[in-house]
Amino acid sequence: MKRSLAVALALLTASFNSLLATSALAVQYPTLDPTYTQEIYTGPLVGGPGMAWTSGNELLTRNGSDILEYSPTQNTTHQGTSLHGVVATHTISGLSSTGYGMTNGLDGYIYTVTGSGLERFNPSNWSAPAQSLPGSVGGAGYGVTTMPDGRIAYSDGGGNSNVYIYDPVALTNTLIYSANYLIDGMVAGPLGNIAVTGQSNSTMTILTSTGAVVNSFNTPHFPDGLAFSDSSTVSILYSNNNDGTISKYVLGPGFSGVPTITDIATGSGAYGDLASVGPDCAFYVSQFNNFGYHGSTNGVGTNWDNSVTNAEPSIIRIGGGLMPDGTTVCQFYSPYTTNVPEPGSMSLLALGLAGLGIAAWRRRRRSR
C-alpha cells in the first residue's frame, strides 16, 4: 500500500514538473523585476517593429505594404520556444512601403507614418485601399501614437524632428513641437501628455497636447519605445532601451521634477526599438540585432528557450507589475483595455471624436 502510494506520488510529481517545464516562458531578459512577467511572443520577426491590433485582439506588424496578422494563441514552435505565429498576410493596396510605426485609431482605422505622409487602412476590410491623409507630413516613419481624444500624434523622425497632431475629422495637421535631435519612439498618456525619446542624444521629453514642454531629462540608456502608466493619478513612464534593458521612470505630480529611474529588465543584449501596449494591457517590446549600436551586443537578437542566442528579431510581451497602491490592475496605458474598435461603430466614433523589416531596420539604425 505504501509502495503504491509512493509510486503514485512520484508519477504525480513527475507529471507536475513536466507541466512546469512545458509551460515555462522564455527568458529574454535574464534579470526581471519579479512583479513583471516575460514571454517571447513571436519571432523570428519579419518586417518592422511597429505594432497594432485587430478587433479580435490579434497582433499586427508591418512589412512594407504587407500587414502580418498573428495567432492570439501559441500555434508554432521555433528554437524550442512556443510562439504566436503568423496566420495571415494582408497586402494593402496603395499603402506606402516606407515607414515602421503604427497605431490603432479610436475610429477603428490603423494609422501609420510613411515617407509620403500619414496613411490609414481598415483592418476590418483588408481589400480596401489605404487612404493618404491630406496635409500630413512624410518622414522616416518611426513615432506615432493615438491621443485620448482620437487625434493622431506623430513625428517626421528627421535629424531635427518635428511633432505634429493630425485631426482625422477636421483633416487638419498642426505642428506642435520642434527638436534639434532625432525623435524616435513616442506615446500619448491618459491625460493627453505626449512623451518623446531623443534617439540621438539619450533624452526623454514630456509635452502637453499643445506642445509645451513639461519636463525634459537625460537618461542612462538610449530610450526608444515608450509606455505611460495606466493610472492618471501617478506620473510613471516606461522605456524599451537600445541596450537590452527596460526602464521605469517615476516623476513628481504632473511629470515634474527629477525622475527616479529603475531598470525593471536587464541583460537581453538585443537592440530595443519601438514598443506598444496591447488591449491586454501588456507592454510589447521589439528586440533585434543592431551590431552593437547604442550599447546593444553585436549578434544578439533573441535568447530562445533552448538556450540558443542568435540575431533573429522578436517581440517580447511584458505583463504584470504592481501599481503604487499594491494592486495588480493594468500597469501600462492603452486607449483600449478590452479590444480594438472597428470602423463604423457609432459608440466608438462617439468615444474617439468626443474631444475633437530586418535589413531595413539595420539600415535606418546604422545610418543615424
Image (spheres, helix red, strand yellow):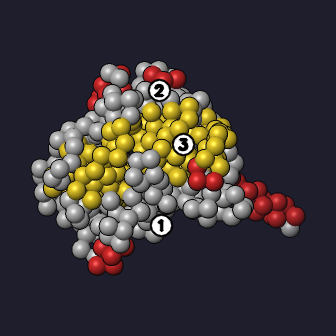
- The answer to which of 342 and 189 lies nearer the viewer is 189
Under circle 1, the secondary element is loop
Mark 3 residue crowding within 10 angstroms, few (<14) / some (14–19) / many (20+): some
**Label 3 – label 1 distance at C-alpha:** 28 Å
Kindly indicate the quadrant of the structure image that contains residue 291.
top left
Whether residue 150 is situated above or below residue 210 in the rendered picture = below
Residue contact between numbered discs 3 and 2, judged by CB atoms under 8 Å: no
Which residue is located at x 72 percent, y 62 percent? 325
Instruction: Locate the N terminus and report the quarter of the image it occupies.
Output: bottom right
**Label 2 – label 1 distance at C-alpha:** 33 Å
Asked if one can make out residue 254 in the rendered structure from this viewpoint, the answer is yes
Which residue is located at x 45 percent, y 58 percent? 192
> Please, what is the three-letter code of the amino acid marked with disc 2?
Asn
Residue 201: which disc? 2
x%, y% of residue 193?
A: 47, 53
Asked if one can make out residue 68 in the rendered structure from this viewpoint, the answer is no
Which residue is located at x 43 percent, y 31 percent? 199
Point out the frontmost of discs 3 and 1. 3
Q: Earlier in the sequence, mark 2 or mark 1?
A: 2
Instruction: Locate the C terminus and report the quarter of the image it occupies.
Output: top left
Q: Which residue is mark 3?
A: 215
Point out the frontmost of discs 2 and 1. 2
Residue contact between numbered discs 3 and 1, judged by CB atoms under 8 Å: no
